Image: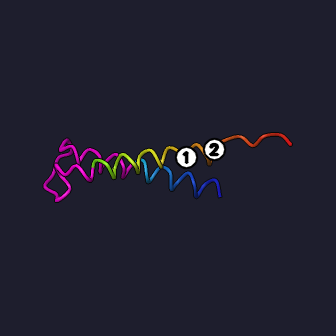
């Protein structure tokens, strides 16, 4: 399960970063997402969610 969560977290971080950069018009290319504020918001949310998933997947379990 840890491997799956790590992969999901990394995918969210990657795509969130791309969406954010496209939303603020800093990523090259001609896309409907370029310069659209909503995509920078979606990208920021996806990026943060990916980091959270990644850290949850890799936290150490407390000794019982």
Screen quadrant of the C terminus: top right
Magenta region: which residues? 14-39
Asked whether, in this view, residue 48 is left or right of residue 17, the answer is right
Q: Position of residue 20 (x, y in %)?
A: 29, 46
**Residue to which mark 2 is pinned:** 58
What residue is rendered at 57% in x and 55% in y? Answer: 5
What residue is rendered at 58% in x and 58% in y? Answer: 4
**Residue to which mark 1 is pinned:** 54
Screen quadrant of the N terminus: bottom right
Mark 2 and mark 1 residues within 8 Å of each other at the beta carbon: yes
Asked whether, in this view, residue 13 is left or right of residue 30, the answer is right
The crowding category of the residue bearing disc 1, from other C-alpha atoms within 10 Å (few below 14, some 14 to 19, many at least 20), is: many
Examine the structure image and report whether residue 6 is included in the region drawn in magenta: no
Q: Position of residue 39 (x, y in %)?
A: 27, 53
Q: Nearer the viewer, residue 23 or 37?
A: 37
Which numbered marker is on residue 25?
Answer: none
What residue is rendered at 33% in x and 52% in y? Answer: 42
């Amino acid at each position: 399960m840890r491997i799956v969560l790590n992969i999901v977290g990394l995918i969210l971080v990657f795509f969130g970063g791309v969406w954010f950069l496209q939303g603020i018009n800093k990523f090259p290319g001609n896309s409907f997402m370029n310069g659209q504020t909503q995509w920078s918001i979606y990208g920021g949310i996806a990026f943060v969610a990916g980091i959270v998933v990644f850290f949850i997947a890799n936290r150490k379990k407390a000794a019982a």
